């Protein structure tokens, strides 16, 4: 099931996310797991702080064609990009941190905070209803911080 989800999600997100990255190293490396040159360039761009390259590199680590799945490494790169207000990185963090299918350690209060920052109201509300009172308190505090610091804006 996860494999089928990977393929569908990779195709969808690849189309959505790499529109702005068309013809760059991350886009090329995402589509071709054998392209080590562009993979290294993409990683270098991500390390230099470019939020789109950070997102692209996370996508490669998570869903890239012909590559091993690295959920925890991808999670860190999504965080780097999300902290720079990258909407799709914030949405991915919400999904990964609340759904065990992605293979990352769950952190539902943090997932709620990222969905709040990215204005994913429906996703945040659905998750809220699953949280314990203690988790809700943690999520509320974290969401206030994330909205103040990282809220997505056009």
Image: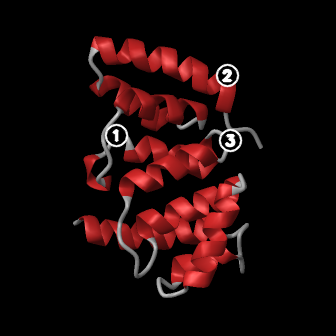
Q: Are marks 2 and 3 in contact (CB under 8 Å)?
A: no
The tag earlier along the polypeptide, 2 or 3, is 3
Please provide percent x and percent y for residue 24. Answer: 71, 76
Please provide percent x and percent y for residue 29. Answer: 57, 79
**Residue receiving disc 2:** 148
Residue 11 sits above or below residue 134 on the image:
below
Quadrant for the N terminus in the image? bottom left
The tag earlier along the polypeptide, 2 or 1, is 1
Quadrant in which residue 28 is drawn: bottom right
Residue at image x 50%, y 68%? 60
Gap in angstroms between the C-alphas marked 2 and 3: 11 Å
Element type at mark 1: loop
Residue at image x 48%, y 73%? 11
* Most foreground residue, 8 or 44: 44
Residue 98: assigned label: 1
Please provide percent x and percent y for residue 37. Answer: 61, 83
Gap in angstroms between the C-alphas marked 3 and 1: 20 Å
**Residue receiving disc 3:** 85
Please provide percent x and percent y for residue 57. Answer: 56, 63
């Amino acid at each position: 099931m996860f494999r089928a989800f990977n393929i569908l999600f990779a195709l969808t997100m690849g189309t959505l996310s790499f529109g702005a990255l068309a013809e760059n190293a991350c886009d090329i490396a995402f589509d071709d797991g054998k392209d080590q040159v562009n993979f290294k360039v993409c990683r270098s761009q991500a390390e230099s702080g470019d939020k789109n390259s950070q997102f692209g590199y996370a996508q490669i680590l998570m869903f890239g064609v012909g590559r091993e799945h690295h959920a925890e490494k991808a999670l860190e790169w999504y965080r780097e990009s999300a902290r720079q207000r990258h909407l799709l990185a914030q949405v991915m963090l919400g999904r990964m941190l609340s759904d065990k299918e992605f293979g990352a350690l769950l952190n539902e209060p943090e997932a709620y905070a990222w969905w709040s920052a990215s204005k994913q109201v429906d996703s945040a509300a659905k998750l809220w209803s699953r949280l314990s009172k203690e988790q809700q308190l943690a999520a509320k505090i974290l969401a206030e911080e994330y909205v103040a610091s990282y809220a997505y804006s056009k």
